[in-house]
């Protein structure tokens, strides 16, 4: 989740700024030339802009080189554009706009370290515009230089206190450093001005969750999904968080809303959401609702959790054979752990299908390395079915690994 949120917030922060051309005083002739080139560029006639600038035979100027570089970039002539930006900087080392433009080319190539180096050389952070300073900050974050990024964020917040983009950059920086307290504080501040920003609510939820503040985490997640009721990922996270906190009642209520609303068909076809809702109904032993929700999902699309819930439902209703079928489907899904084999073995034993129970217990014992509870289940079954010697041998092997197990020792004494 963190990386997704990071990208969402950073996208709102990092933008290669439009280079300002109006800060420098030029002669009337150059001003007229630049206006003409600008007109061509606004009309997307980039070749005409290049022609008029390249054919200029008057006094040269860094602004001409900068405008020519911008036009060449639009024609995907990146190498030529870089040369023009460099010419502008050779003419005037303090012409930071050309440095920003050059860094922009490297940023588009995701060569963040090179972009940072160029900005560090040419950009004066004390007098540049907010967009350029923010761009510098963002490239520092992407180049994984938190110290530089932190300093640039502080400078931006001091110079442009009403520009919340620098606070967003501070939020991104806090996320990358796993500073949940700062991230939560900054997100809360930003939400005062933009309470409907889903990405900020997601960030607050992430921060609260990772700092152990469960109640705030739930509140933030709830706000996220209220801001965007069609965001199914948030619905899943909210219901999962409710279950994790033990609030299966609210989880069930959310499920009822979803399955009776305009997106009910989409919800019922989402196995992750349905699995969570089934878990909620099973936890609360709301058997009629559980049966209804299980019935909405095709057997072949049911998750492991759904099969477990179905088995438990059958057991509560005294239908051992049906429970066994549900657990066996867990095995068919692949990679079951020992507990699944023990469960289906026990159900087989209850059905008096002892041969099947032996097979399942042996598999559980194999997964446990011969030293787990599978040995006890198998020994008990052998004893029940008149295979006392085999049962005793298994218990002796087990006690070799677990000499402190008094119950197993008592069982062995009984057999001997």
Image (tube, rainbow, N blue to C red):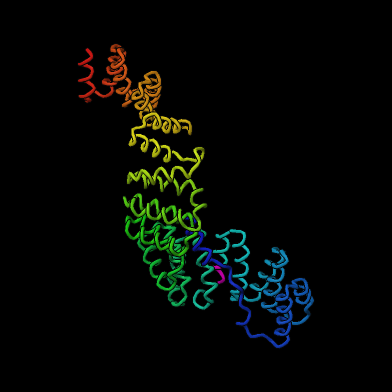
- Could you tell me if residue 148 is visible in this image? no
Q: Residue at x 44, y 68 (%)?
A: 151
Q: Residue at x 44, y 33 (%)?
A: 330
| Vertical position of residue 282 compared to residue 50: above or below | above
Q: Quadrant of residue 408?
A: top left
Q: Quadrant of residue 403?
A: top left
Give percent across and percent down for residue 39. 72, 79
Picture quarter with the C terminus? top left
Give percent across and percent down for residue 254. 40, 55
Toward the viewer: 208 or 268?
268
Give percent across and percent down for residue 288. 37, 44
Picture quarter with the N terminus? bottom left
Q: Residue at x 57, y 66 (%)?
A: 118
Q: Main secondary structure of the magenta part?
A: helix
Give percent across and percent down for residue 208. 36, 58
Q: Quadrant of residue 87?
A: bottom right
- Could you tell me if residue 356 is visible in this image? yes
| Vertical position of residue 291 compared to residue 98: above or below | above
Toward the viewer: 275 or 130?
275
Q: Is 329 situated left or right of 40 in this image?
A: left
Q: Is 141 situated left or right of 369 in this image?
A: right
Toward the viewer: 301 or 375?
301
Whether residue 56 is in magenta: the answer is no
Q: Residue at x 51, y 52 (%)?
A: 265
The span shown in magenta is 119-123
| Vertical position of residue 195 compared to residue 323: above or below | below
Toward the viewer: 306 or 207?
306
């Amino acid at each position: 989740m963190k990386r997704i949120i990071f990208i969402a917030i950073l996208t709102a922060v990092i933008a290669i700024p439009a280079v300002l051309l109006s800060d420098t005083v030029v002669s009337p002739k150059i001003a007229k030339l630049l206006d003409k080139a600008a007109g061509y560029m606004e009309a997307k006639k980039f070749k005409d802009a290049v022609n008029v600038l390249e054919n200029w035979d008057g006094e040269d100027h860094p602004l001409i080189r900068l405008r020519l570089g911008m036009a060449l970039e639009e024609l995907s002539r990146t190498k030529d554009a870089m040369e023009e930006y460099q010419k502008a900087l050779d003419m005037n080392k303090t012409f930071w706009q050309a440095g920003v433009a050059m860094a922009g080319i490297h940023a588009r190539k995701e060569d963040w370290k090179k972009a940072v180096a160029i900005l560090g050389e040419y950009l004066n952070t004390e007098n540049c515009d907010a967009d350029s300073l923010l761009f510098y900050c963002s490239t520092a974050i992407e180049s994984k230089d938190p110290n530089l990024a932190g300093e640039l964020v502080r400078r931006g917040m001091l110079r442009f206190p009403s520009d919340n983009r620098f606070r967003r950059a501070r939020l991104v920086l806090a996320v990358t450093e796993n500073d949940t307290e700062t991230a939560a504080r900054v997100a809360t501040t930003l939400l005062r001005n933009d309470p409907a920003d889903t990405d900020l609510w997601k960030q607050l939820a992430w921060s609260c969750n990772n700092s152990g503040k469960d109640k705030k985490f739930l509140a933030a997640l709830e706000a996220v999904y209220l801001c965007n009721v069609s965001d199914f990922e948030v619905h899943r996270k909210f219901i999962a968080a409710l279950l994790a906190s033990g609030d299966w009642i609210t989880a069930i209520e959310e499920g009822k809303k979803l399955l009776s609303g305009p997106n009910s068909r989409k919800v019922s076809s989402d196995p992750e959401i349905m699995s969570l809702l089934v878990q909620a109904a099973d936890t609360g032993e709301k058997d009629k609702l559980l049966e209804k929700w299980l019935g909405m999902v095709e057997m072949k699309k049911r998750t492991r959790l759904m099969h477990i819930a179905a088995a438990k439902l059958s057991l509560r209703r005294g239908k051992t054979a049906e429970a066994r079928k549900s657990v066996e489907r867990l095995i068919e899904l692949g990679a079951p752990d020992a507990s699944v084999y023990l469960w289906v073995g026990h159900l087989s034993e209850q059905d008096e299908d002892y041969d099947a129970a032996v097979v399942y217990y042996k598999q559980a014992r194999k997964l446990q390395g011969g030293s787990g509870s599978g040995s006890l289940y198998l020994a008990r079954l052998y004893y029940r079915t008149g295979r006392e010697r085999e049962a005793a041998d298994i218990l002796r092997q087990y006690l070799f690994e677990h000499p402190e197990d008094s119950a197993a020792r008592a069982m062995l004494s009984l057999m001997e």
